[in-house]
Amino acid sequence: MKLFSSLGGLLRRPEAGAFLGLFAVLIFFTVFGGLTFLKPAGIASWMNVAANLGVIAIPVGLLMIAGELDISVGAMVPLGAMTVAVISGHYGLSIWLGIAVALSFGVIVGLINGYMVIRTAVPSLIVTLGSLFAVQGIVLGLTVLITKSTSVALATEGSAKTIFGDFFFGGQVQVMVIWWLAITAAYIFFVHFSRFGNWIFAMGGDKISARNAGIPTERMTILLFVLSSTSAAFVGMCQAILYNSAQVAGGQSFIFNSIISVVVGGVLLTGGFGSIVGIFFGTLTFAIVTQGIYYTDFDRNWSSLIIGILLLLAVLMNNTFRKMALSYAPKKAVK
Amino acid sequence: MMANALLSLKGINKSFGPIDVLHDINLDIRAGEVLCLLGDNGAGKSTVIRLLSGVHRPSSGVIEIDGQPVSFKSPRDASEAGIATVHQFGGTFPLMSIGRSFFVGVEPTKGIGLFKIFDRKRANAIAVQAVQSFGITRITDGDRLVGGLSGGERQALAIARAVHFGARVLILDEPTAALGVKQAAHVLRIVNEAKRRGLAVIFITHQVMHAMAVGDHFAVLIRGGIAADFRKGERTREEITDLMAGGETMAGLEAQIEAESA
């Protein structure tokens, strides 16, 4: 009885669908891919993908909870990578300067996105679509102008390499995994335990009521945009340090992949509902599907099909769980 | 003698560009009294609410609280002065829990410094207790989502929230419009409870029956001006309905429609 009621409680939480989805894909790929998929090398392969995506997916998910969308992350990843590569690789300046400038570009683009969203009545999808293309143009144009190439090498040594772009555990796990876990823990506190989280949910539920209740909705909106574009620049910067080079292309996949992770994670596309743990599970599920396919006998071209079906199933499941949460009322006052 | 007005509108005019929406509005609202603001669509009721809740500012005239002129630059100013507005659907957040939505913007926290955490237990307990004090005893779990409550319960939650945070003037914008008969009766009882606690209530409605059930004082708006201002028992239901229809008699309108359809 006790177990049953706590199971019901679990199903009403936003992360219920993501948790079940994660469980399902784990079983699926263990059955079809064998146990190598769960050995350290296998785990490292999907944890690495999940970590790079997860650092971006959480702030993208927070924006979605607050009723906004940021697709400019797809251009911020190459911008972050190229900035550090041009400054510290091409010009040979200090790596710390490259890191600082890459992150400040993230902050600047986030400020512009946020400011445009609150000052114009244009939906954030369109605003960030504009900044996506604008930033892509800047990255390509400036890189070719400065380096006469679309790919820039970067050699990093010392503590910057260890902190931002190295492997550990026998050279398989990226240091990004640790960043991801630490950042997730910080977000869980920020969103679910501090009062600021309440503000984000209120903004997504009803922005005008939230503002009337005294929440600084405009400052919060700008802050969330800064978080997402800086996180994307951070991931790009770390990848450049890890792989010792940066390309102007790439990063586009982060747009849809982060949205899929967030939605599979139980965040409501129209805002007001979701959880960090859900986004965490959603990212993990997504990464397992994209990597797990290599451990099976299936052609990897099928992985998109699985992701598509997974997304639709997750949305349907999340709708059901949300309805359950809404209609839930204790049967009798238990005293 | 009657108590002094808690909230007064004196010679209020409001125009949006060349369009005059309100002209020369004078109203007194007293503590422990329900003022019913009646009027057809477009008569200016919503504009009066928006002036009082700080969304718009009057073009001329003054708003006074306790005899002191006040000027609201934002909805926040109005709520700090003790004016709370509750909208048709409760104006709350359907996918948030009762406890969390009750304390949006003023979350109780425990702990110190950077590690202040939202005190869920305390928030839930206070919210549930506040709603129950308005007679909604079915709400016992502060973790329930607001969207799962009935329309009447949501209104009760919103009103209880306003009262808890020290509202002195409660503006109810068509609280019974979307409700069934039983639910509406529930809300009317809550209005009476708010009045009993000494709040000044401004009750906006289309339904004359609901207005007459709780109102002490009635004001009818027609095309931006006050067409009638009277106390309980001074007019009959038919007279009020006719006033709301814009001065034409309802019987006349009915006859007209019948003639056209014949």
Image: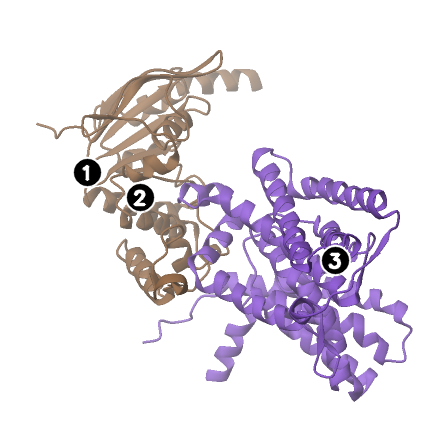
The residue identified by callout 2 is: B188
Q: Are marks 3 and 1 on the same chain?
A: no
B109 is higher (above) or lower (below) than B220? below
Q: How many marks?
A: 3
Q: Secondary structure at mark 1?
A: loop
Measured as percent of width and height from the top left, residue A204 is found at 54, 50
> Does any portion of residue A256 appear in the rendered image?
yes
Measured as percent of width and height from the top left, residue A35 is found at 78, 88
Q: Secondary structure at mark 3?
A: helix
Q: Which mark is residue B5?
A: none
Query: Which quadrant holds the C terminus of chain B?
Result: top right
> Which chain is home to disc 2?
B
> Which chain is home to disc 1?
B
Colour of the chain lettered A = purple
Q: Are marks 3 and 1 in contact (CB under 8 Å)?
A: no
> Which chain is home to disc 3?
A
Q: Which mark is residue B32?
A: 1
Colour of the chain lettered B = brown
Single out the mark in the foreground, 2 or 3.
3
Task: Using residue A86 as the reference point, say whether residue A320 is left or right of it.
Answer: left
Q: Secondary structure at mark 2?
A: helix
